[in-house]
Structures are given as structure tokens and as C-alpha cells.
Image (cartoon, rainbow, N blue to C red):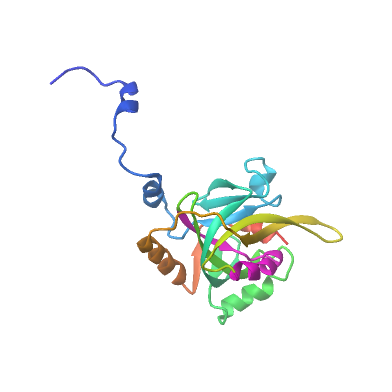
Amino acid sequence: MSNELARIEDLENLDIDKHTEEEWDAAASSNAFLPRLQLLTSNSAKCKSGEFSTNHYALIQDQKFDDLGKNIDVLLITWQPKALETGDAIISSYDPNSDEFQRIQKKASERDSGCMYGPEFLVWIPAIKRFATFFMGTKTARRESGNVKALLKKAASLTSQECKNKKYTWYAPQVSECSTPFDMPNKDELLEACEQFNNPPKSDIEGVSEEEETRAR
């Protein structure tokens, strides 16, 4: 056996990393929830600070924001109703008939209430081979959500659209049909993601803040 010591440079040439980035994400994540896909606009603290490009889509998990660009292709898989209240804790309800859901829904009409409601979609993002949730909880996003629902079980392209009223200009998600071929997810992984998405607690507390989105119109 040689007594020669290894060098730092030797590590670069050794084939010792056997696992993928996807496996890292699964092992390192402290969050039991699927990551979320979100359009970050000028309301976002990340955009205001210059940390993130305005009107780009982000994949968010464990406070990590990955920039996916201005346009993103997704497979729209299924949906569920969701009501969200932000504060010291993030409270989510998925049962529209529950008192919790209806309380949050009613409170969402109040300015700066920290409450939102709307459809949440399960999507597959082929560019990064990840599943994510896409919550359309603002008033403007809910108006566009019907167009998203119309493309369920199909490929779609997400971008942003400019919205205006007499006082303000803002941006919101926009969807169109996607004709670009892309890789589909593994069937077992798809079923697992659907099982996780379709069986959330009736009311739960999440560890990831969506407070910037609650201020969008």
C-alpha cells in the first residue's frame, strides 16, 4: 500500500459521486410539502432587493429560490381548492365546506389581510424534472385559472401578462397551450406525486411563506 497522500486536485478526477441532483433534493429537503412554482413580481421582497429577476418564475422550497425564467413549459396534471392565511404561521385549508376555508376566503377580500384562496395545480416541470404546486390565489390569478383548468392533462406554457387599472400596473400569470415536445415523468413518480398532492391535511401549517404573493392583485 502506497504512503502517498491524496491531493485536493485528485477529487476532481475521481468518479465517486453516484447520485443525481434530484436525489440530493429529495434527501436534503426538510419540507414534507411539494415545492411550489410562483411568478415573482415587483411586490416580492426578493425582486425589490435585486436578488431575483422581476416577472420570472421561481421554484421555491426550504427558502431556496431557483430562477426558471420568464417562460416555462409545464404539464398540468390535476388541481384542488386551497385557502391560505399567512402570518406567524402559514395556515392552509383544502376543504371549501370547512369553517376554516370559508373564514380565510371571506377575509381575503380585506386589504393586506394576508389571506388568499383559489385553485392549486399539480404540475410537472420537464426542464428540471420536478413536480411542483402552482397556486393561483390572487384575484387576477383566479381570473386566469379557468384557462389553466381548460388545459388539464395537457402541456402548457406559463408566462406573465401586464394588468392595469386607473391607479396601478402589475403582472400576473398567463397560460397558453404548448406544442413543444418534452419528456414525461416516470409513471411511479407521477402516481406518488398525485398521491401526495391529493391527500393534504384538511388544515395544515406550512413552513414556507408566500406573503409577497398575498399582496398581489
**Quadrant in the picture for residue 101:** bottom right
Q: Residue furthest left?
A: 1
Is residue 141 visible to the viewer in this orientation of the structure? yes
Residue farthest toward the right in the current orientation of the protein:
166
Closer to us: 91 or 139: 139
Asked if residue 103 lies left or right of residue 8, the reply is right
Image spot of residue 213 (x, y percent): 65, 58
Magenta residues, start to end: 130-150
Left or right position of 51 against 198? right
| Front in this rendered view, residue 42 or 147 | 147
> What residue do we see at 87% from left, 60% from top?
166
- Residue 28 x, y percent position in the rendering: 39, 48
Numbered marks: total: 0
Q: Which percent across, then down, holds residue 64?
A: 52, 47
Quadrant including the C terminus: bottom right
Please determine whether, in this image, residue 136 is positioned above or below residue 105: above
Q: Is residue 164 magenta?
A: no
